[in-house]
Image (spheres, helix red, strand yellow):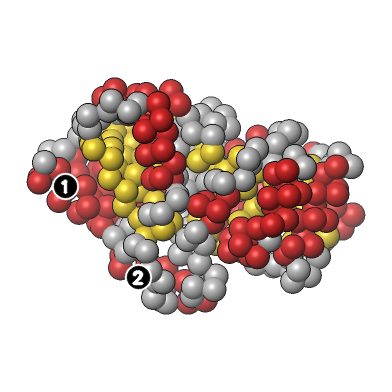
Amino acid sequence: MFEINKRNARMWSRIGARAFYGQAISALAQQNDNIIALSADLGRSSGLSRFADDHPDQFINTGIAEQNLVGFSAGLARMGFDVFSSTFAPFASLRAGEQVRMNMGYMHEPVKLVALGSGLAMAFLGNSHYGLEDVAVMRTVPDLTIISPADCAEIYKTLHACVGFPHPVYIRLTGAIGLPVVYEDDYDFRIGRGVWLRPAQDVTLVAAGSTVGHCLKAAAELEEQGLSVGLLNMHTIKPLDAEAIVACVGTARQIYVIDEHTRIGGLGSAVLDHINEHHWDYQGRVFIHGIDDRYVETGSYPFLLERNGLDAAGIAAFVRQRTEAA
């Protein structure tokens, strides 16, 4: 097992989510020969080169054929293997969407589909590789769990929790090299249960994925300016943590959902849907801060975050403007 501590967290941050995924799944495979990793010709891009060398009998490259990747994975899962399959987010959610719906959802095959470089992380590769609609698509598939880990430590926690998990899972990896560190100590991770990083306040942020790290910095900046802000890491987007939502609506006058995803259908929509169904008498406001309904320009990842107001400064400004107007 990997030890979660300050030194390791910083080292993992430097290599980023994709490379760390390969290291983490390789470490798990050393203890469990039932794990099989598949890739749609992205072994090097997903950090799986060492996995393929160390566990050649547990690695399969299906080639650039994402639909076959999901179908092949479903067959292996039916045979009882713990299957982790990886490709870029839009190819997993859109190109192979029908196979996910039928083989993973309808047939209940517990494939763990790992979406690499989701959000804006693919930077200069542009809109063909951005994962800005994937949660919206995957939320519509019954029986599909959606997890978006906050940092590398939580990626390992997620993978570990998914071994033997009897449901299909979409694991959404966001962020690039220099992934913001959220966890420097071990903690209790449970699928379907959010983690409070700062207690619920009158103003509370809800986020998932690498956005959580930027929210931590934004909350610290806002606190220096006299505004106490709560922060919930809602790593499991489906199913949502109902108890955490109760804490939000019971305490917060303003809930801000920060999402590296289009504002349509993502975490913000999931939170609003839940509140409208279960807390229809909530008197506060829910703000969604994500990607506008448009195709996004190409550029470096830090530039794209800044341009779309999803870095720490942009998040703090979004919250500050609305709290001052309230």
User: Badge 1 is on which residue?
Assistant: 322
Q: Which of 237 and 225 is in front in this view?
A: 237
Label 1 sits on what residue type?
Answer: Arg
Q: Is mark 1 on a helix, strand or loop?
A: helix
Classify 10 Å Cα crowding around label 2: few (below 14), some (14-19), many (20 and above). Answer: some
Give me the residue at 47% from left, 61% from top: 132
Amino acid type shown at disc 2:
Phe
**Left or right for 316, reference 212:** left
Locate the C terminus and report the quarter of the image it occupies.
Answer: top left
Disc 2 secondary structure class:
helix
- Answer left or right for 258 relative to 12: left
Q: Quadrant of residue 59?
A: bottom right
Nearer-N-terminus badge (1/2): 2
Name the residue rendered at 32%, 48% in the picture: 288
Which mark, by number, is residue 260? none
Residue at image location 57% in from the left, 43% down from the top: 146
The residue labelled by disc 2 is 303
* Position in image of residue 158 (x %, y %): 61, 40
